[in-house]
Amino acid sequence: MLTTTITDFRKDIKRYLDNVTQNFETLIINRGKDTGVVIMSLDEYNSLSATQHELSSKANEKRLDSAIEKFNNGLSFENDLPE
């Protein structure tokens, strides 16, 4: 996780954004006492959104837990997908 001030961010926006996208970093820009902004890559945002959706209901959470348990116990299998 990277942290900077708004002043430093303005001076070198490209470098900061390159770090976020290329190195999967999260950037926090402090804007004063107890305020700030978080910048993350679109891939990271999409991943967090998908995880939030999967855990948004107890039924989804139970299905996911069951799948993980089956995988960990060797009860999973590979399935070839049609192209």
Image (cartoon, grey):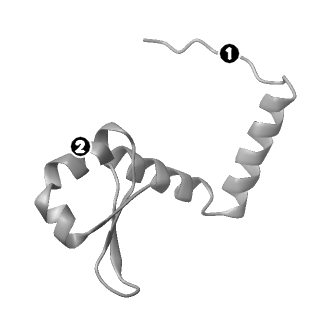
Determine whether 27 is above or below 25 in the image.
below
Packing grade of label 1 (10 A; few <14, some 14-19, many >=20) is few
Image label count: 2
Secondary structure at badge 1 equals: loop
- What residue would you read off at disc 1? 78
The quarter of the picture where the N terminus appears is bottom left
Q: Residue at x 20, y 64 (%)?
A: 8
Q: Position of residue 57 (x, y in %)?
A: 65, 63
Question: Nearest the camera: 54 or 20?
Answer: 20
Q: Position of residue 15 (x, y in %)?
A: 20, 47
* Type of the residue with mark 2: Asp
Question: Nearest the camera: 68 or 21?
Answer: 21
Residue 34's image quarter? bottom left
Secondary structure at badge 2 equals: helix
Q: State the residue lying farthest toward the right.
A: 73
Determine whether 51 is above or below 76 in the image.
below
The quarter of the picture where the C terminus appears is top left
Q: Disc 2 to disc 1, how far (Cα)?
A: 37 Å
Q: Position of residue 26 (x, y in %)?
A: 39, 55
- Mark 2 and 1 residues: CB-CB less than 8 Å, in contact? no
Q: Along the polypeptide, which appears first: circle 2 or circle 1?
A: 2
* Type of the residue with mark 1: Glu
Q: Residue at x 53, y 15 (%)?
A: 81
Packing grade of label 2 (10 A; few <14, some 14-19, many >=20) is few
Determine whether 1 is above or below 28 in the image.
above
Q: Is residue 23 left or right of residue 6?
A: right
Q: Residue at x 73, y 47 (%)?
A: 63
Please identify, in this view, whether the residue under mark 2 or under mark 1 is nearer the observer.
2
- What residue would you read off at disc 2? 18
Q: Is residue 35 left or right of residue 59?
A: left
Q: Residue at x 70, y 46 (%)?
A: 64
Q: Is residue 26 left or right of residue 66?
A: left
